[in-house]
Amino acid sequence: MLSSAAPVSYASALLFGSAITAVTTCARDSLPEHHWTTAIAGLTTVFALGQCLGPLLAGALAGGPSGTTAGLAIGAVLLALAAATALAQRARTAPPSAPAVPSVSVPTDTVPG
């Protein structure tokens, strides 16, 4: 919306293209490994539905009395909710690892003889 210049378009694509990466990282940080595939598939599907339905809703709203203002306002609210949700996520703590095996030190400064 700010510009139609190519660098701005590339920056937009980079920012919005990273959504799936963020979803994958969130799922991996928040869930045990055996839930990753199902969670990432579900989140990606919901994201895709939003990508399909968002323009339809924005177009319907743009034809209304408030023009594009309502669509932009709803988009801003949804983005703020998504940001708040992302900030509220806590990383899953790793399960305790096995006890460390004591290391054996071998002196290297002794010379036989």
Image: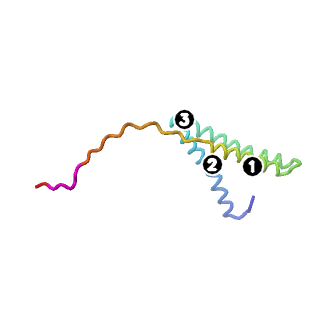
Residue furthest to the right in view is: 65
Q: Relative to the observer, which residue lies in front, 31 or 105?
A: 105
Q: Nearer the viewer, mark 2 or mark 1?
A: 1
Residue bearing the label numbered 3:
35
In-front residue for pair 75/95: 95
Please state the horizontal and vertical placement of residue 54, each as a whole percent of the image: 74, 45
| Element carrying mark 1 | helix
The kind of residue tagged 2 is: Ala
Q: Which quadrant is home to the C terminus?
A: bottom left
Along the line of sight, which residue is nearer the eye, 111 or 36? 111
Look at the numbered discs 2 and 1 and tell me whether their residues touch, using CB distance below 8 Å.
Answer: no
Q: Which is in the foreground here, disc 3 or disc 1?
A: 1
Task: Tell me how the rendering is colored.
Answer: rainbow
Identify the residue at the far left of this view: 113
Q: Quadrant of residue 5?
A: bottom right
- Check the image and report above or below for 13 versus 94: below
Q: Earlier in the sequence, mark 3 or mark 2?
A: 2
Residue 111, x across and y down, in percent: 15, 56
Find residue 109 and report its horizontal and vertical position in percent.
Answer: 20, 56
Please report contact status of discs 3 and 2: CB closer than 8 Å, yes or no: no
| Label 2 Cα neighbours within 10 Å, binned few <14 / some 14-19 / many ≥20 | few
Which stretch appears magenta?
106-111
Q: Work out whether mark 2 precedes mark 1 in sequence or the reverse, and give the earlier one.
A: 2
Residue type at mark 1 is Ala
Which quarter of the figure is the N terminus placed in?
A: bottom right
Residue labelled with disc 2: 19
Image position of 52 (left or right of 107): right
Tell which of 70 and 63 is nearer to you: 70
Which residue is labeled 1 in the image? Answer: 76
